[in-house]
Image (cartoon, rainbow, N blue to C red):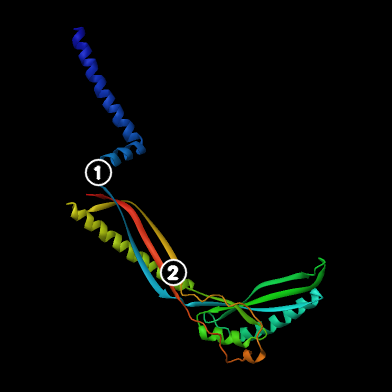
Amino acid sequence: MMLKWSKRRSAWSAVGGAVLTAGLVLANPVLAQEALATSESGQVVHLNASAVREVPQDWLTMQLAVTREGADPGQVQAQIRAALDASLEAARAKAKPQSMEVRTGQFALHPRYGNNGRITGWQGQAELVLEGRDFGLISRTAASLAPLVVSGSSFSLSRQARQQLESDVQREAITQFRGKADEIAKAFGFAGYSLRQVSVSSVDGGHGQPRPVMMMARAEKAMEADAAVPVEAGKATVQVTVSGSINLR
């Protein structure tokens, strides 16, 4: 009798342990997920797909600067302000939304020192910025705003163009990822797949941008209104990569 009771007790202990283990797994989603991942570890495939597109840059930013120097800082500042205000008014008269927008840039006023370490004078500089999609209008306007001179320029994508480009490239990369996943599943003899995890990243850059034009003194005859500053846009590149893993089914 004692022997039979021991056997029954062992059997119930085994059943109770199994029920307890199952209860723990079901009660703990993390354990359940780990168990599922372990059972499907042989059916997981990692892959990635990329899409790249190159488009002309459509936004020009051009900086113009005026420099003045003298013994009195107030007088230097007044001269700079007078030149900047006149150029700002002339540029605003030609401004158009998106085509050419006008704003002021940096302003700086600093002392100049002699060999004895004392202040010998003051130098100031102010900046006017023209930017937009109409390259011809911007370059012609820049050439007409004497005494300001071009101190730098750069090309980029407008916000609208960049958003549209990133959306198109992302859609293309996702399509390539799905096509590659479907191809891999069929190659291994499975009917299809399910997404396990996925991430999307993008990288953008530009090339062919002109180097900044260093500010220099120019003769009055070079300041003709019709003498447009030569500019040439480069291209912008956006690349989107979709990476992830799939479960073959």
Quarter where residue 29 is shown: top left
SS label for mark 1: helix
Residue 220 horizontal/vertical position (percent) = 67, 90
221, 181: nearer the viewer = 221
Image-quadrant location for residue 239: bottom left
Residue 189, image x, y percentages: 17, 52
Q: Looking at the picture, which amino acid does disc 2 mark? A: Gln
Amino acid identity at mark 1:
Gly
119 over 95 or under it: above or below = above
Q: Decide which of 196, 147 is in the foreground and name it.
A: 147
Residue drawn at point x = 35 percent, y = 55 percent: 243
> Residue 42: which numbered mark, if any?
1
As displayed, is residue 14 above or below residue 28? above
Q: Quadrant of the N terminus?
A: top left
Numbered badge on residue 163: 2
- Left or right of 97? Residue 115 is right
Q: Nearer the viewer, residue 244 or 72?
A: 72
Query: Dot 1 surroundings within 10 Å: few (below 14), some, or many (20 or more)?
Result: few
Residue 172: x %, y % from top left: 33, 66
